[in-house]
Amino acid sequence: MIFRIFVLTLLLSGTAVFAQFDFNFRGYVTDIPIYQSMDDQFGSFYDAPKNSFVNLTRLRLKPEFFIGNNLRFNLEYEISAYYAGNVSASLNEPAKTNRQLADLIWKPVSEDHYNVIHFIDRLYFRYGFEFGNIIVGRQRISWGAGRIWNPVDLFNPLNPITFYKLEKDGADAISALFYMGDFTDLNLVFNPSEKIDESNFGFRFRTNYGEYDFSLIGGRFDNQKVIGADFAGNLLDAGVRGEGIYSYRDSGYLKFILGADYQFSPKLYGLVEYHYNGEGKTDKENYDLFRLLRGEIINLSRHYLAVMTSYQIHPLTTISLTTIRNFNDNSGYILTNGVYSASDNMSISLGALITYGDFLSEFGYYPKALFLQADYYF
């Protein structure tokens, strides 16, 4: 931990010596008390109690340093405090991902019911050129057009059922973006691994035609060749989008999404998205739960449909409902949420996660939850 702080201090002090810089500081703090309930059959699988209380408090600090006209340094540092009423009940804690080379997580407090975790989720330099920019360090690489799933996003996937997580995990990478004309660019990314021959690299070429944006991606990820594409645009008054990849791993597999959204009125919004996951299994007895727990995949089965709607019942209050169904094992979940904007900087929400499914079904493994969330931005 001391070494990490020393390196960070050295970086900041070094830039201060050689250049004048502007400073911007922002962030947020959020507190989420969660009551969880799990069916007895699934609780025995997890060795967890049927009912439990968990509280998650997150403080995220996001300083930015603007060095001269072209260089920027970004840091996002988070302190998370977890309390679990039962020892075996907890949320997924931050962990080093397979897209991160350095382990920037440490736990100064670790007790039976309470722990505190510090971690760095973004840490990068960005240098701008006339023809583009280059980013070096832990960063978010945002590929894809989907709203619920992003099969094209091979760097920062996020499980849609994780309602208490806002940001995608950062990836340790070198990313170069080259402008090639109006609405056209090329993104090259190198994501190193501890074994250099197992590193990931890829490209994304993006352009525009009419009312549509198109992208073509390719590269090597997790020792497999991947090619894919995405699009987003308008069809009449509705927004439409799609994306997909084909992986040459083993016998090969295809993943894709097709979605549409529509603003029915100034207050009512709706979205639908279908996901085909060729890497998944059609038989729930063949699900690879260990890959799911390791974060290598985010879904277990093949065919999914998501429907989301939101309605503004008051200028300061919006309610939403999201449902996802697995059509192979007939499991799914319903997430309801109401958000009240208490001020320009603060919001309060109340929500419920209702999961359903038979034994061994995908979403049957997840507990039901009732939660309250307060967010303050500064």
Image (tube, rainbow, N blue to C red):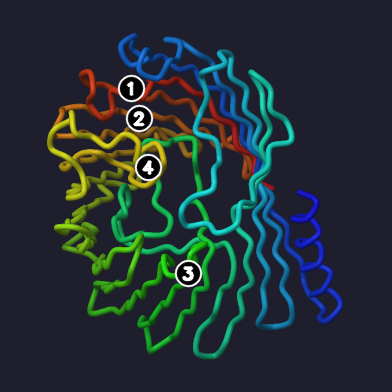
Residue that label 2 marks:
335
Distance from Cα at disc 3 to Cα at disc 4: 28 Å
Rendered location of residue 126, percent (x, y):
61, 74
Q: Secondary structure at mark 4?
A: loop
Residue that label 3 marks:
196
Q: Nearer the viewer, mark 3 or mark 4?
A: 3
Q: Earlier in the sequence, mark 4 or mark 1?
A: 4
Distance from Cα at disc 3 to Cα at disc 1: 43 Å
Distance from Cα at disc 4 to Cα at disc 2: 14 Å
Q: Earlier in the sequence, mark 2 or mark 1?
A: 2
Q: Tags 2 and 1 in contact by the CB under 8 Å rule?
A: yes
Rendered location of residue 213, percent (x, y):
28, 72
Residue at coordinates 45% horizontally, 20% vertically from top-left?
370
Q: Earlier in the sequence, mark 3 or mark 1?
A: 3
Q: Nearer the viewer, mark 2 or mark 3?
A: 3
The 10 Å Cα crowd at callout 1, few under 14, some 14 to 19, many 20 or more, is some
Please give left or right for residue 112 compared with residue 373 in the image: right
Q: Secondary structure at mark 3?
A: helix
Please give left or right for residue 74 compared with residue 88 in the image: right
Residue at coordinates 27% horizontally, 37% vertically from top-left?
288
Residue that label 1 marks:
354
Residue type at the position of mark 1: Ile
Q: Nearer the viewer, mark 3 or mark 1?
A: 3
**Residue 159: mark in rendering:** 4
Rendered location of residue 282, percent (x, y):
13, 37
Q: Tags 3 and 4 in contact by the CB under 8 Å rule?
A: no
Q: Secondary structure at mark 2?
A: strand
